[in-house]
Amino acid sequence: EVQLVESGGGLVQPGGSLRLSCAASGFTFSSYEMNWVRQAPGKGLEWVSYISSSGSTIYYADSVKGRFTISRDNAKNSLYLQMNSLRAEDTAVYYCARGSKSSSWYWDYWGQGTLVTVSS
Amino acid sequence: AIRMTQSPSSLSASTGDRVTITCRASQGISSYLAWYQQKPGKAPKLLIYAASTLQSGVPSRFSGSGSGTDFTLTISCLQSEDFATYYCQQYYSYPPTFGQGTKVEIK
């Protein structure tokens, strides 16, 4: 069974940093592209970042470019999101999501999400 | 970025009803469209990709159609477990973008 389990969310002050993790199991993690997608409270879904299966190709939404860093450790079946210079508008539930085999850009499995709250 | 607009934003329906949700893209996206279902406090679940292909395990009462700029998600006979918010998402061009969601509520 495919499982994605996020962790690392919490309350952080504006300007602070946080590192999210996503532990994958039930599939060959190193064969799949992965993404982070977020959802502000009561709002819709927003794609945040993409990383290829090898980690060699990375993309970011303009809203987080230069502040967030996506990475992965295929030996540990884990995906990460380092978030720096956090702003109030980064407050959201962050989901890790697996790219489908037919396209990297829609997502067939999602984790349960981890809440990041940026507030003083 | 391609803008995705869903209508309606919300609707009320009864169990057994036929429900149709529309998604319009600001420019042509061929058939590069996915639909997700999200229940409160839960992660989105993939229902349909390539505009009309049902994801494995999704009930056949769900169907999708359309290409270019106009798409629909239809639930042929609404069940109690279908009350949720539905999102369309284009993956024709970078960055991938979502519609604002359609909340299906119990009448």
Image: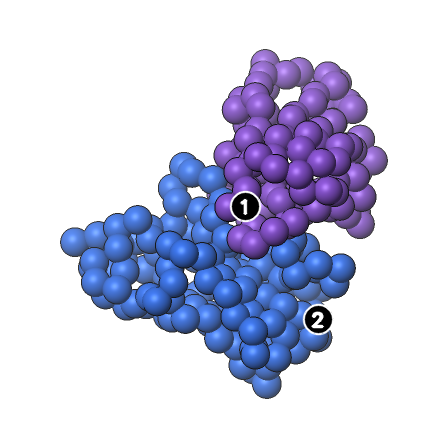
Image spot of residue B57 (x, y percent): 79, 47
Query: Residue visible at 45% across and 57% down?
Result: A61
- In the rendered image of the structure, the colour used to display chain A is blue
Q: Amino acid at mark 1?
A: Thr
| Protein chain holding label 2 | A
Image spot of residue A20 (x, y percent): 41, 67
Q: Amino acid at mark 2?
A: Phe
The outermost residue toward the right is: B60
Of B97 and B45, nearer the camera is B97
| Protein chain holding label 1 | B
Q: Quarter of the image holding residue A26? A: bottom right
Q: Quarter of the image holding residue B105? A: top right
- In the rendered image of the structure, the colour used to display chain B is purple
A66 horizontally vs B104: left or right: left
Image spot of residue A39 (x, y percent): 44, 47
The quadrant the C terminus of chain A occupies is bottom left
